[in-house]
Amino acid sequence: ETSGNFSGENSNGYFHDFLVVALPFEVKLNSGKLFGTVGLNLKGDDAAAEPTSPFYDGGNGTNENLFFNFGYQFGSAKKAGQWQAGVEYRYIEAAAYTPNLSDSDFGKNSTNQEGLVAKYKYMATDFLSYGVTAFLTDSIDDSDYWGDAISKGKTTMLQVDAAIKF
């Protein structure tokens, strides 16, 4: 059963067995902020147990429904000469979320991934910023999870960008 028409890298037509509950948090400190989210797909076990599901775990009955992230950001780049830097850890089990909605840069837009995201941003002017982001990810479970090969193994990506605010 599929619903919707999804396209793009690692898009997934299987879009059911999702009932996600998430609790985000953010704590502002003098030097920056601590942030994160803890979430659970309440139907993730159903998706992992369904042989037609791309999140199928081979009938092992493993839980594949948890996701979370936590990180820290130093500084806040909003005006010329300001900078910010941060580091974040992410963990997304196979049936915890859909790759159709997740960050397309993290783990090549796959689930069954964990890893680090490091960011730096510098405001050259009040409207022009430069940034660098590094994504270092690896699969959580190569043995129980029967998903696509794209969801297994390490990925490393460096993103460099410039942005203009209007």
Image: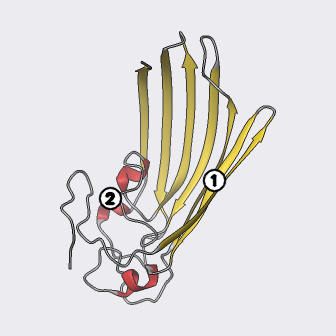
Element assignment for label 2 = loop
Using a 10 Å C-alpha cutoff, classify the residue at mark 1 as few (fewer than 14 neighbours), some (14 to 19) or many (20 or more): some
Question: Going 61% across and 15% down the picture, which residue do you hit?
Answer: 79
Using a 10 Å C-alpha cutoff, classify the residue at mark 2 as few (fewer than 14 neighbours), some (14 to 19) or many (20 or more): some
Residue 120 in percent (x, y) is at 57, 28
- Please say if the residues under marks 1 and 2 sit with CB atoms less than 8 Å apart: no
> Mark 1 sits on what residue?
36
Question: Going 36% across and 51% down the picture, which residue do you hit?
Answer: 108
Work out whether 62 lies above or below 97.
below
Residue ranking furthest to the right: 30
Name the amino acid, label 1.
Gly
Residue 32 in percent (x, y) is at 73, 34
Q: Is residue 80 left or right of residue 143?
A: right
> Mark 2 sits on what residue?
100
**Which sits earlier in the primary sequence, circle 1 or circle 2?**
1
Element assignment for label 1 = strand
| Quadrant that contains the C terminus | top left
Residue 142 in percent (x, y) is at 42, 70
Count of numbered badges drawn on the protein: 2
- Front in this rendered view, residue 101 or 132: 101
Residue 133's disc is: none
Q: Quadrant of residue 50?
A: bottom left
Q: CA distance from mark 1 to mark 2?
A: 21 Å
Report the colour scheme: secondary structure
Answer yes or no: is residue 16 visible.
yes
| Quadrant that contains the N terminus | bottom left
Question: Going 36% across and 53% down the picture, which residue do you hit?
Answer: 109
Question: Going 25% across and 51% down the picture, which residue do you hit?
Answer: 9
Work out whether 110 lies above or below 20.
above
Work out whether 8 lies above or below 60.
above
Name the amino acid, label 2.
Asn
Q: Quadrant of residue 13?
A: bottom left
